[in-house]
Amino acid sequence: MNNRLLLFLETIETSNSISEAAQKLYLTQPYISRVIKKYEQKYNVILIDRNSYPIQITPAGHLLIRHLRKSLQLERQFEVEVHQFQNKHFSTLRMGITPPLGQNFNLTILPKLLKKFPALNTKTIEIGTIEAKKAFKDYQLDLFVGNIIHLPNTECEQIYTDKQVLVLSKNSHLYHPHKKEIQVSPQELQQLNHENFIVVDSQQGYQEIVDNYFYEMGISFYPKIHVRDSITALKLAGKGLGNMSTCLEAVQNTCYSNINYIKLPSDKVKIDFSITTAKTNKSLSLEITYVKNILKKLFISNILVY
């Protein structure tokens, strides 16, 4: 329960309301409120200021978050350090991959990995960079493929830089029905002001980069729809429900119609795919090195396929 409470409080900390936090977690607002209220009664304190907008964590709430994080980190650190005393048959390699590349990652990595190390257990999760950074801090990940992560207990190696585009739905003011890639001037881009935008909640750090780029150009979008992965967002854009941003490789797939895309400047908006590994897990160093070698060889051809 403490891990769940920590997740709720951390999500509320980066949201405007409990309802928005509930959407990000794919839970109901009454359920989250009930859990928070339970612990407020337990500790006889107020954890969140419900009268402010955006909603605020109280000093007591911040204190609880710090203690919960510390407790979780100590628990995870123990699990990692005790690993060296465990039988190799019970070792689990915990790998994270940025959405929506999880299926390609598993189909590429797991057959080769388990053939090489048949006694190994594996756990793969689709996870955004911000969540992955927290997971490394809490000793919950051994390897992650996504944006660059810099932490004292991790090593990071870049493997690919992905070009980004702004996808326009058929309901956009700038949409051209007989084109896919379009060229627009900065003045024409102003027509996009306050158009609907589809946000990928698992890519908060990337979304901030995109938002800042358009903010500097005097353009702001209305985040109408929140989804978990960019493939879903792209399909919704194809149905005319809003604009979104994604990588160039994704929109070049012929299955996505009824969209336009505008290439974004790579010096302003980009994704650097990297392999981040935990320095602490020495017992799985051979397995981690093997996965890294597969990724370097097959990432573009087998995994970065939309």
Image (tube, grey):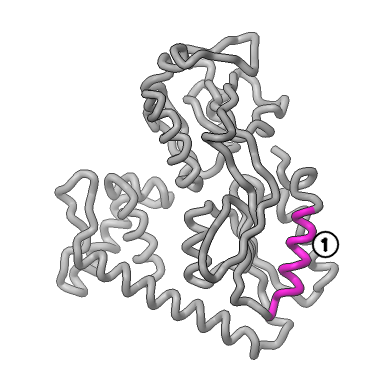
In the displayed structure, 87 sits above or below 174; it is: below
Residue 1 can be seen in this image:
no
Residue 257 placement (x, y as % from top left): 65, 21
Outermost residue, right side: 115
Q: Is residue 77 above or below residue 157?
A: below
Q: Is residue 95 magenta?
A: no
Residue for point 46% across, 37% down = 199
Residue 20 spot, x, y in % from top left: 33, 45
Give the percent coordinates (x, y) of residue 198.
47, 32
State the extent of the magenta-drawn residues as a range: 283-296
Q: Secondary structure at mark 1?
A: helix
Residue at 60% from the left image edge and 51% from the top image edge: 146
In the picture as drawn, the residue positioned furthest to the bottom comes out as 85
Which of the 4 image quadrants contains residue 154?
A: bottom right
Packing grade of label 1 (10 A; few <14, some 14-19, many >=20) is some
The amino acid marked with disc number 1 is Lys
Asked whether 282 or 100 is in front, the reply is: 282
Residue 197 to residue 187: above or below: below
Residue hosting label 1: 112
Q: Where does residue 164 sit, x and y in percent of width and height?
A: 59, 33
Q: Residue at x 47, y 16 (%)?
A: 186
